[in-house]
Amino acid sequence: MAIDLLARLYDPVMYLPERMLLRDHREYLVADVSGTVLDIGAGTGALFPYFAESATNGELTVHAIEPDEGMRTQAHERLHTLDLSAELVGARAESLPYPDNTFDYVIASLVFCTIPDIESALDDVARVLKPGGEFRFLEHVRGSGTLGTLHDTVAPAWFHVAGGCTLNQETGRLFQNDARFELLEYERFEDGLTRAVPVIRGRLKRRQPSVRERLSFG
Ligand SMILES: C[S@@+](CC[C@H](N)C(=O)[O-])C[C@H]1O[C@@H](n2cnc3c(N)ncnc32)[C@H](O)[C@@H]1O
């Protein structure tokens, strides 16, 4: 019940940030996507209208995973209002229910802050991406200096009121330092609306899996 309430509050709470900040970032995430795309932690389907727009420009098959039933219900509701067909399933990013080398794009939008095991999630993103495929991300991250210390202090309380969101997640380091990917683009925003909570976005290209990786895939 409380969980459902959180899901129902998500879109109203995000109404202003969506309009004032996120639109440009969401357009970046879906720019020129084609082929087969996976939206991990789709939430209420905030990216779906953007996929619908891209789908009119070319062939696009959209898959999405979302573990929270309340969020999933709203994502299904949003899908019905759009000219978009997407397969939406209940799953976690740490254990994606897809074979190796399935997707041309995997997109994470404001989701690694909520994933309990971000290393395992990135392992599974690497596994399901085709070689040459792209992982695109938009995430809020821990601030630097005094702001970072403030985030560390507030993070435990924030985790409880914000549905398991980790305010001081250091996701950028994880994404920048992974040998399985080539870093195509990485930007950090920390002015204006992002002064209190910095945001990163970027694109990583999946390299050919090494022999060692191929063996561990089984
Ligand atoms: C802040 S919302 C972002 C939703 C959406 N991507 C957006 O851009 O609005 C974070 C979402 O991640 C989901 N989530 C939590 N744990 C997850 C996990 N382990 N794997 C995938 N998604 C997860 C939550 O249920 C929630 O819907």
Image: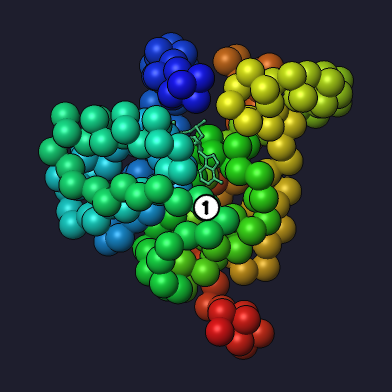
Tell me which residue sits at (54%, 72%) in the image. 207
Vertical position of residue 189 compared to residue 180: above or below: above
Residue 77 falls in which quadrant of the image? top left
184 vs 128, nearest the viewer: 128
Quadrant of the image for the C terminus? bottom right
204 vs 140, nearest the viewer: 140
Q: How many marks?
A: 1
- Residue 115 percent location from the top left of the image: 61, 43
Circle 1 is placed at which residue position?
93
Ligand 1 within 8 Å of the CB at mark 1 = yes
Residue 204 visible to an observer of this rendering:
no
In the figure, is residue 146 to the left or right of 39? right
Tell me which residue sits at (74%, 31%) in the image. 168
Residue 66 falls in which quadrant of the image? top left
| Numbered disc 1: secondary structure | loop
27 vs 154, nearest the viewer: 154
Tell me which residue sits at (67%, 68%) in the image. 179
Residue 160 falls in which quadrant of the image? top right
Tell me which residue sits at (27%, 42%) in the image. 51
- Residue 68 percent location from the top left of the image: 45, 37
Vertical position of residue 174 compared to residue 18: above or below: below
